[in-house]
Amino acid sequence: MKNKPQIFFIHGGMTFKTRKHYLHFLKTRTINIKDEPRWYNEYLDLKLGKTFEIIRPRMPLKEYAKYEDWKIHFEKHIPYLRNNLILIGGSLGGIFLVKYLSENKFHKKIRSLYLVCPPYDNTLNAEVLAGGFKLKNDLSLLEREVKDIHFFFSKDDNIVPISHAEKYRARLKTAHITIFKRKNGHFRISTFPELVRLIIENSRITSLFPESTTPKR
């Protein structure tokens, strides 16, 4: 394919109220030098990379994220994006997309939006939502911009409670919300077949995929 359909993925991150809190986190956190596979890396490449162009920008200061910094970096990519774009946001990347698309007109057609365990507000179990990521009351522009919105939450998520799913449900009437029983906490999983099936199904290009990966109804 000359111009593959694009998938644009925004990873998660962390926010802190002050730099003092951030420095404390750096000094006290546990380091793991093993590179654990995640669903949004090799797995997506394996399942979708032959048909889609997968773009994964590294957002600024992932572990001390600021919304305005992420907004600038995101907008630098927009000229390179094409219509019928698929957007995926994981955790903080999810609430970033909700906030951006509910506050800004997006001048490319978005085919689908997939949001994996995005926080809704600062009522988190183990982290703080700060850095300017707070949502405004009116999210209606998001539903006007995107007709196909999917949320994914898990009951065993130790960071974003499933109560956040209900908060999004109350604000976004047309969104599809899926709640899993178990996804290894905050979606620390190496595969995500449910998401892949939805992307294939909703992209309307299932004929381009091998029979073994085409979702069965």
Image (spheres, rainbow, N blue to C red):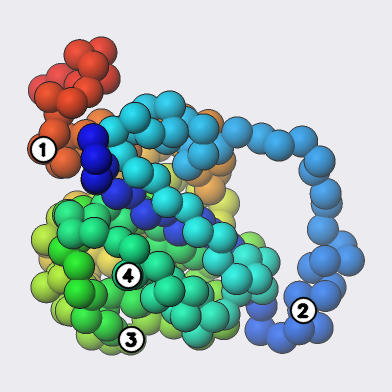
Residue farthest along the front direction in this orientation? 2
Kind of residue indicated by mark 2: His
Instruction: Give coordinates of residue 192: x percent, y percent.
Output: 41, 33
| Residue tagged 3 | 136
What residue is rendered at 34% in x and 77% in y? 100
Question: Residue 21 bears which disc, if any?
Answer: 2
What residue is rendered at 47% in x and 80% in y? 72
Disc 3 or 4, which lies upstream in sequence?
4
Residue 29 vs residue 176: left or right? right
Instruction: Give coordinates of residue 208: x percent, y percent.
Output: 18, 26
Point out the image quarter for the C terminus: top left
Dot in front, 1 or 2: 1
Disc 1 or 4, which lies upstream in sequence?
4
Label 2: which secondary element: helix
Residue 52 vs residue 200: left or right? right
Label 1 CA crowd tier, 10 Å (few <14, some 14–19, many 20+): few
Instruction: Using the numbered discs, state the Cα–Cα distance from disc 1 to disc 2 in whole angstroms.
Output: 46 Å
Q: Eyeballing the image, is 140 above or below 78?
A: below
